[in-house]
Amino acid sequence: MNGFRYERTPIDEEAGARRAGSFAEILHAYTRDQAVLEAQRCLQCAMPFCVQACPITQDCRGYISLIAQRRFDDAARLTLLDNPLATVLCKCCYHYCEEDCVMGGRGTPIAIRHLKRASLDHGHSDLVYVPSAPRSSRVAIIGAGPAGLMAAWELALRGYPVSVFEQEPFLGGQVDTIPKYHLDGTELRRDLDRFRDLDITFVTERRAGRDFTPESLLAEGYRAVYVAIGASDPRALGVPGEHLPGVFPALPFLLAVNRGPDGLFGRKDRAVVVVGGGDVALDAARSALRLTASGTITVVYRRSRDRMPAGVEEVAEGTEEGLKFLFERVPVSIVGDGYVAGIVLRRVTEGPPDASGRPTTVEVPGSEHTIPCDTVLVAVGEKADLTGLPPELGLTPAGHPWPQGKRPGWMTEVEGVFASGGRSVVYAMSAGSRAAEAIDAYLAKKEGRDPTPRPDPFGGASRPGPPPGYGGPTWTL
Ligand SMILES: Cc1cc2nc3c(=O)[nH]c(=O)nc-3n(C[C@H](O)[C@H](O)[C@H](O)COP(=O)(O)OP(=O)(O)OC[C@H]3O[C@@H](n4cnc5c(N)ncnc54)[C@H](O)[C@@H]3O)c2cc1C
Ligand code: SF4
Ligand code: SF4
């Protein structure tokens, strides 16, 4: 026995049986003592693999060290130094850092994300970000999701007046669709409260392509525009019967569930089929389970269980809560007389690999069978909605569902207009951060000055940078 504790200090959680039927948060916060115990397991590696794996270079090694010393106020400040949406991320980040934590090689990785939450829960986290001296160049951002909010923070810290145009009446983008058993819905407001002294104006219910365009914003006097509109247009199944009442795309379903207690279809027993195998499908299925006390929720996915793109934790928790899974099946049609009565599925097997190396699916003739159900939730991916946006921007996505500029710094085909997004909250924030750097460099060049590195967000004299030993990112956007 060498004194290392390889196993994680347990994180208390709602029991599986109690979870179905309740949107209560699953994970319970660490107490101060539990957090200190867990933080003291960290080896404080000279080369912090955890930091290198984090798309926003969060100095997690640093806040863990401070928690281990019971310095919770300092830990909170360090967390918020590079992470303006930390209250959101401490509950929903896919914790890429933990995958690279060296403790994972011998036991369980340090609970880096949960310790982030401990730093904010037990330290003084009601801090306020401080802008630099004001600049004259105004910047417009379209979309108030994580990418747009991160870019707004980066630019406003550098002194730029920023206007964020958002089509919805609320901020946060897809963060608002994350189920309440992960995020209770207050987190984003707590994070944005720290923005209160920054020169950021939020203009809601204004849609690019309908009320204005990026070019019209440039004509109004904005010196640069960042298009951060994500990908929120649900893809359809493309099978007969999809128009029937009782078929819902997963994203509006999840949004409605977060808005009202009963979502789109009220609380009653239902037989729900969810089509898809990603995190959104699992969120939709687990939310449906919480609305239908003794109904059945079946997830239908076209590949095998081990090829599901959904996170391992989501699948394990969903199974524990009572989800059923049908693998290697594709929908053929949705049937019903005026309302959904069933979904016809066909079996598939694995075929030769496609260009990306993933096996193709080969349909098995004559294997059709019908699953009776009264509700179908469709979660087969999203795409960007470019309605009304000028084609000369060249925003058509390539290789990812959100629009991204194809010139250096993600500039689009129109000078001064930038566009990007990301596959998760922290990746979108990283994209927003990079876009803000590119916009600052673009404006600096026009104004004949050097680009501005990110200043100390709390107004200090020093400029925060990567922590000692940092060897560069181990991820790509
Ligand atoms: C159900 C669900 C659960 C998820 N769970 C997690 C999770 O647990 N952890 C995680 O890390 N990630 C999760 N994600 C992914 C994550 O939310 C996204 O990757 C991230 O929000 C993308 O950020 P973004 O800023 O690029 O785009 P978005 O979040 O989509 O934000 C884009 C914003 O632009 C606005 N907009 C769009 N078009 C226009 C227009 N024409 N004019 C004005 N405004 C416009 C939209 O209304 C939106 O507010 C989840 C996603 C979904 C759908
Ligand atoms: S933001 Fe996410 S990836 Fe980065 S340190 Fe926190 S949990 Fe890890
Ligand atoms: S990799 Fe793991 S053990 Fe090493 S500093 Fe990071 S959290 Fe600590």
Image (cartoon, rainbow, N blue to C red):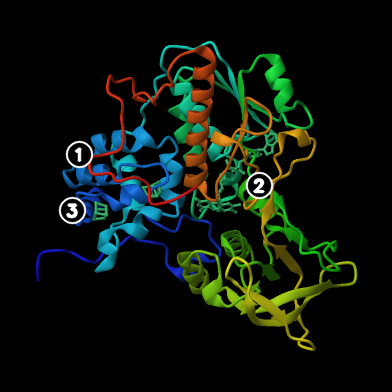
Q: Which residue in the rendered view is the most extreme toward the bottom?
A: 366
Observer-side mark, 3 or 2, equals 2
Residue 410 falls in image quadrant = top right
Q: Which mark is residue 231?
A: 2
Mark nearer the N terminus (3 vs 1)? 3
Percent position of residue 46, x then y: 19, 49
Percent position of residue 125, x then y: 34, 34
Residue occupying the point 54% across, 64% down = 310
Q: Give the SS element for disc 3.
A: loop
- Whether ligand 1 has any atom under 8 Å from the Cβ at mark 2 is answered as yes
- Whether ligand 3 has any atom under 8 Å from the Cβ at mark 1 is answered as no
Q: Give the SS element for disc 2.
A: loop
Mark nearer the N terminus (3 vs 2)? 3
Q: Which mark is residue 40?
A: 3
Residue that carries the numbered disc 1 in the rendered image: 71
Residue 307 falls in image quadrant = bottom right
Tag 3–tag 1 contact (CB < 8 Å): no
Amino acid residing under circle 3:
Gln
Res 455 visible:
yes
Q: Which mark is residue 134?
A: none
Amino acid residing under circle 1:
Arg
Q: How many marks?
A: 3
Left or right: residue 366 compared with residue 449? right
Residue occupying the point 25% across, 35% down = 73
